[in-house]
Image: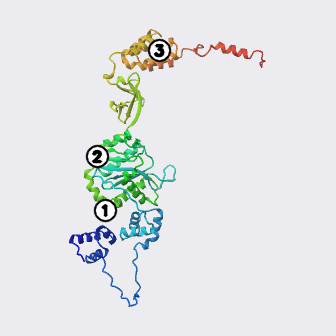
């Protein structure tokens, strides 16, 4: 019989002290179970070997032989019910410890479950990543939860972010998703871990990937900007290749196994359960691939994570606007100056809570950034104003001057005061000329010139409070009123009338 070295003996004793079953120590060390049992008995970790029962020459046993009985047998009914629900051995073991005071090992539960439901063998590739280098994200389905609006039980979305090296994860359930919600979940995950990874590997969800492509995927702009704020970059999986993020796929299945057979009355209740379960069970488990505790591996990976920035990412809306002839774009009723050579073209606009950014649609270069202002207000850049009044403004002044001398004075005063910005006001005066007679507009401009009020609102207020003109019967489309009276008389000619 070959004697074991001191190191091999200490390894076997150390594993037995961790509570490992003899079968598991046999698989891990390669030594026979009889040798493991002998060393365990010598160290006082296993009970003494029972004496053999003598047999007679006929081979009959002097006393009935007792067969080993699993300590899970007393919980058979519960375990069978959980297996029917689809729960895995880990979830069943956790439930036995928490609710039934089970003191046996996990391997005993796993063997018992395996007899009830033989598992299928599966071959998969392993992708090992350096610490702090990669995290994987994806959506799954959570446990049935009562919806706050319908009152019915529905399965919410389950978001999971898993670290590539340690397999530590951040799970959270939610009802609705969007590009901003998707990015906010990443921020919550980074905050939970205390740092960010350099690469985030998502699936080809629309919230993160606008155009999936094998060689040139297009990332959602808001998602990419949020990750860049943390120093991360999204590297999506190839279409129809989810095995590239097998760690988060496995994590989602692991979380869903813990949720099997459970119902919750609210999303907050489910998330509180997941947080407690993740800290007590998921992070303290011995991972099946690495054979190490997840929490211990995470403590090794934590120093390699990127430090979090001092502030959270500021989210914004992305839109498209046309630069008008006066050089402004309109956002929420306010006007913001754009470079003059973009007049008549479309630009990309990022609308934040405190700022508005104008982006070139071809190069994605930042053109202008303005502080948000109120409705009707303008943000002007003096360098972008033309050196002289454009000829189109002078044409508008000349057209208004034909209505009367005071109309001409009013138009020239507006042009002198505002320059290129006078175009909108002058167009407003022409609109008033279409709805009022030249005489009425001339009287309004007379009062405006007297009061030195070079505002279109002054003209509108005067014309609204001085309705001196009656309805006219002349119109370029509508015939004169006499035409209708003659037509009516012709149609009713010769017909009797009631007196």
User: Which residue has dot 1 on it?
Assistant: 291
Taking depth in this image into account, of 385 and 83 the one nearest to the observer is 83
Visible in this render: residue 428?
yes
Q: Quadrant of residue 284?
A: bottom left
Q: How far separated are the C-alphas under marks 2 and 1?
A: 30 Å
Which of disc 2 and disc 3 is earlier in sequence? 2
- Number of the front mark, 2 or 1: 1
Q: Residue at x 28, y 59 (%)?
A: 296
Q: Nearer the viewer, residue 66 or 486?
A: 66
Q: What residue is disc 3 on? A: 444
| Secondary structure category for the residue under label 3 | helix
Q: Which one is closest to the eye, mark 3 or mark 1?
A: 1
Coloration mode? rainbow
Q: Is residue 239 above or below residue 1?
A: above
In the displayed orientation, state which residue is furthest to the bottom: 57
Task: Indicate the secondary structure of the residue bearing disc 1.
Answer: loop
Q: Is residue 348 above or below residue 268?
A: above
Closer to the eye: label 3 or 2: 2
First in sequence: mark 3 vs mark 1: 1
**Quadrant in the picture for the C terminus:** top right
Give the residue pinned by disc 2.
308
Which mark is on residue 391?
A: none
Residue 49 appears left or right of 423: left
Q: Are the residues flagged by discs 3 and 2 in contact, CB closer than 8 Å?
A: no
Which numbered disc flags the more N-terminal residue, 2 or 1?
1
Q: Position of residue 98 (x, y in %)?
A: 39, 66
């Amino acid at each position: 019989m070959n004697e074991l070295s001191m190191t091999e003996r200490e390894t076997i004793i150390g594993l037995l002290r961790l509570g490992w079953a003899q079968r598991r120590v046999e698989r891990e060390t390669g030594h026979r179970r009889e040798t493991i049992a002998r060393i365990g008995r010598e160290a006082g970790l296993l009970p003494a070997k029972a004496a053999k029962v003598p047999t007679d020459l006929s081979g009959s046993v002097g006393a009935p032989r007792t067969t080993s009985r699993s300590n899970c047998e007393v919980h058979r009914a519960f375990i069978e019910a959980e297996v029917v629900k689809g729960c895995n051995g880990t979830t069943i073991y956790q439930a036995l410890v928490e609710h039934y005071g089970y003191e046996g090992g996990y391997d005993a539960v796993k063997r018992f479950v395996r007899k009830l439901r033989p598992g299928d063998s599966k071959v998969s590739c392993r992708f090992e990543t350096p610490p702090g280098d990669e995290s994987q994200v994806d959506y799954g389905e959570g446990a049935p939860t009562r919806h706050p609006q319908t009152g019915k039980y529905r399965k919410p979305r389950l978001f999971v972010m898993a670290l590539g090296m340690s397999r530590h994860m951040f799970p959270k359930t939610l009802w609705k998703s969007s590009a901003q919600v998707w990015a906010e979940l990443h921020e919550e995950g980074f905050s939970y871990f205390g740092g960010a990874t350099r690469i985030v590997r998502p699936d080809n969800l629309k919230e993160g990937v606008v155009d999936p492509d094998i060689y040139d995927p297009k990332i959602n702009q808001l998602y990419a900007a949020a990750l860049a704020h943390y120093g991360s970059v999204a590297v999506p999986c190839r279409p129809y290749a989810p095995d590239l993020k097998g760690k988060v796929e496995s994590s989602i299945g692991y979380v869903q196994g813990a949720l099997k057979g459970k119902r919750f009355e609210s999303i907050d209740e489910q998330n509180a359960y997941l947080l407690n379960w993740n800290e007590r069970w998921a992070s303290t488990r011995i991972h099946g691939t690495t054979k190490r505790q997840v929490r211990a591996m995470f403590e090794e990976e934590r120093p390699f994570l990127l430090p979090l920035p001092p502030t959270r990412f500021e989210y914004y809306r992305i839109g498209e606007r046309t630069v008008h002839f006066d050089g402004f774009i309109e956002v929420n009723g306010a006007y913001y100056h754009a470079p003059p050579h973009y007049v008549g073209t479309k630009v990309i606009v990022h609308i934040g809570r405190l700022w508005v950014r104008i982006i070139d649609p071809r190069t994605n270069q930042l053109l202008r950034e303005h502080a948000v202002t109120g409705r009707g207000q303008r943000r002007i850049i003096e360098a972008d104003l033309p050196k002289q009044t454009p000829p189109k403004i002078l044409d508008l002044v000349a057209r208004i001057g034909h209505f009367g001398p005071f109309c001409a004075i009013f138009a020239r005063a507006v042009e002198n005061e505002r320059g290129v910005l006078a175009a909108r006001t002058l167009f407003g005066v022409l609109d008033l000329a279409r709805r009022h007679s030249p005489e009425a507009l001339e009287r309004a401009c007379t009062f405006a010139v007297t009061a030195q009020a070079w505002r279109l609102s002054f003209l509108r207020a005067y014309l609204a409070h001085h309705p001196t003109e009656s309805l006219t019967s002349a119109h370029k489309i509508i015939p004169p009123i006499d035409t209708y009276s003659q037509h009516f008389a012709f149609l009713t000619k010769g017909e009797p009338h009631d007196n």
